[in-house]
Image: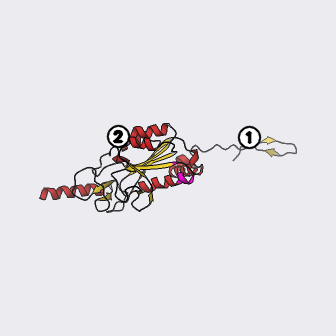
């Protein structure tokens, strides 16, 4: 309600109230609904077109069966649609589905160049706008310098890899890649025992070596709680022997 003292007289005996002033709310969509803001931001970035992106490093990480390779392939195909020069690399040791193609667990594929070391990536990336790297955890630590070198020279680098091994320990060069990345996306599989978001790739075969290429016959995605239960059950079995 406007107080009488604030009214101003006009000719003819009428009175006029002062104009109302509204203050903008201190919190916008970004603060009130951060998840909606992030979705809108990602949609805006994609709507600007792939050619607008500058040299950068993007890391996609998570457990097995979480969709890392699918997301990598999706981004690479978008870059190809934008008529950019693209090349994707994978470790030569990864021959699970194909000797040459990068293939996801749902059998989505894209042609790739298998290499034995990270240094080879630089040799084959000349003239590329976008470089993709799958299963980065299997590469040597030089992959970090390779990615930085490419990004610093205007190349968009998209890296996918396991963030942890089957023991829940950070895997190979992935922690360093995540540290230097411009953007990190962590994707999650579904825990096969309770349906929660998976935390780690649990190895279900009795093999102790760190690198063991496998699929559903060797690994299962588990949440943190189910993973601890699985470890406790294994320890109990070992003690009973």
Q: Is residue 204 above or below residue 137?
A: below
Residue occupied by mark 1: 6
Q: Are marks 1 and 2 in contact (CB under 8 Å)?
A: no
Residue occupied by mark 2: 141
Q: Is residue 112 left or right of residue 16?
A: left
Residue at 42% across, 39% down: 146
* Distance from the alpha carbon under mark 1 to that under mark 2: 72 Å
Quadrant location of the C terminus in the rendered image: bottom left
Residue 227 lies in quadrant: bottom left
Residue 185 shows up from this direction: no
User: Looking at the image, which is closer to me, 133 or 218?
Assistant: 133
Residue 235 lies in quadrant: bottom left
Residue 102 lies in quadrant: bottom left
User: Looking at the image, which is closer to me, 137 or 195?
Assistant: 137
**Residue range (magenta):** 78-85
In reply to whether residue 80 is colored magenta, the answer given is yes
Q: Residues within 10 Å of mark 2 (few under 14, many from 20)?
A: some
């Amino acid at each position: 309600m406007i107080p009488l003292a604030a009214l101003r007289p006009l000719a003819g005996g009428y009175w006029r109230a002062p104009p109302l002033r509204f203050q903008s709310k201190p919190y916008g969509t970004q603060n009130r609904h951060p998840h909606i803001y992030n979705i809108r931001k990602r949609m805006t970035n994609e709507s600007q077109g792939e050619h607008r992106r500058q040299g950068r490093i993007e890391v996609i990480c998570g457990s097995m069966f979480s969709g890392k390779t699918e997301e990598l392939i999706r981004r690479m195909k978008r870059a190809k649609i934008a008529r950019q020069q693209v090349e994707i690399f994978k470790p030569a040791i990864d021959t699970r589905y194909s000797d040459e193609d990068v293939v996801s667990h749902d059998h989505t594929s894209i042609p790739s160049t298998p290499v034995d070391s990270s240094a080879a990536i630089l040799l084959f990336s000349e003239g590329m706008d976008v470089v993709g790297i799958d299963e980065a955890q299997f590469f040597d630590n030089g992959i970090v310098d390779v990615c930085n070198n490419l990004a610093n020279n205007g190349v968009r680098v998209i890296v996918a890899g396991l963030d942890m091994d089957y023991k829940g320990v950070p895997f190979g060069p992935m922690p360093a890649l995540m540290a230097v990345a411009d953007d990190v996306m962590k994707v999650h599989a579904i825990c096969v025992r309770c349906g929660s978001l998976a935390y780690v790739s649990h190895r279900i075969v009795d093999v102790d070596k760190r690198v063991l290429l496998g699929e559903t016959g060797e690994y299962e995605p588990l949440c943190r709680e189910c993973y601890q239960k699985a470890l406790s059950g294994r320890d109990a079995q070992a003690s009973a022997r």
